[in-house]
Image (cartoon, rainbow, N blue to C red):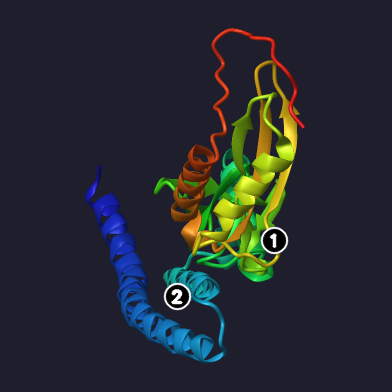
Amino acid sequence: MSILDLEKYQTLLTDWAITFVPRVIFAGIVLFVGLMLAKKLSAITYKALEKSGLEKEVLDFLHSLIDVLFKIVVLLVAASIVGIKMTALIGLLAAAGFAIGLALQGFLGNFAAGLTILFFKPYRIGDWVNVSDHFGKVKNIQIFNTTLETPNDKVLVIPNGQVTDNIITNFSTKGKIRLELEVHMPYEESFPKVRSVIQKALTQSTIIDHEPAPEIGITTYDSHSITIAIRPYIDPDQYWKATYEVYALIKSEFSKNDIKAAYSEGVALGPIGE
């Protein structure tokens, strides 16, 4: 390589540095100041949204979304100062977004379902619901999933896509739910007598609601016994406490009234009671 060539490349490098380095420095300053400004604007926006009375779940989501948008704007401005063409950059981001979208269809579906839940509010934090065949209290609503706490203290994380694709039962809309309890009665026992005994047991409960009156009825005829359903209304927060109390009260009344138990071992023929 000749001295003329070296001088030529040196001149080009110097010209490039004179043109490009100030842009990089200026873009860095814009990026630094812009991100600080975006953070402050995001905080101001959050306070403004907070005054609008939006629920916390929606508020947090909008805040995070606006924060990301502010930062993207700052990055695009800094990139344009460096000399990167906006159209090319936006096209690259769009292509990348399309590719990521195809790879994460389920992820994006949960995201869209989360937006539906946050804005249309089929349930709120603290509600007792049945979603995707799971019953529990809503502990958290996130943009991709809903967290339930079941009556037996299990924590369920359900993708929002499954929530919106299924029937949602919100028990807290009316504030009460029905317990679904069952006891078994031998065929030779009198059903009116057993029903009366169960009703007496339920009147002793301090947890269940007595208005409307609990439902008591025969649901199944098994080979060795009759299944009786008991459906009292309760506060959802008293689910297990009410269950234990009602079963204990019924057991006590069965014992006092000499109502026999139905056993499943073997099949014995016997008379049918009233």
Q: Residues within 10 Å of mark 2 (few under 14, many from 20)?
A: many
> Looking at the picture, how far across and down is residue 204, in whole percent?
52, 59
Mark 2 is on which residue type? Val
Residue marked by disc 1: 213
- Could you tell whether 100 is left or right of 150 in the image? right
Q: Residues within 10 Å of mark 1 (few under 14, many from 20)?
A: some
The location of residue 257, given as percent across then percent down, is: 55, 40
Residue 256 percent across, percent down from the top left? 49, 42
Task: Decide which of tag 2 and tag 1 comes sooner along the chain.
Answer: 2
Q: Regarding mark 2 in the picture, which secondary structure is present there?
A: helix
The label shown at residue 200 is: none
Three-letter amino acid code of the residue under disc 1: Ala
Nearest to viewer (mark 2 / mark 1): 1
Quadrant occupied by the C terminus: top right
Q: In terms of depth relative to the viewer, which is nearer, 256 or 203?
A: 256
Residue to which mark 2 is pinned: 74
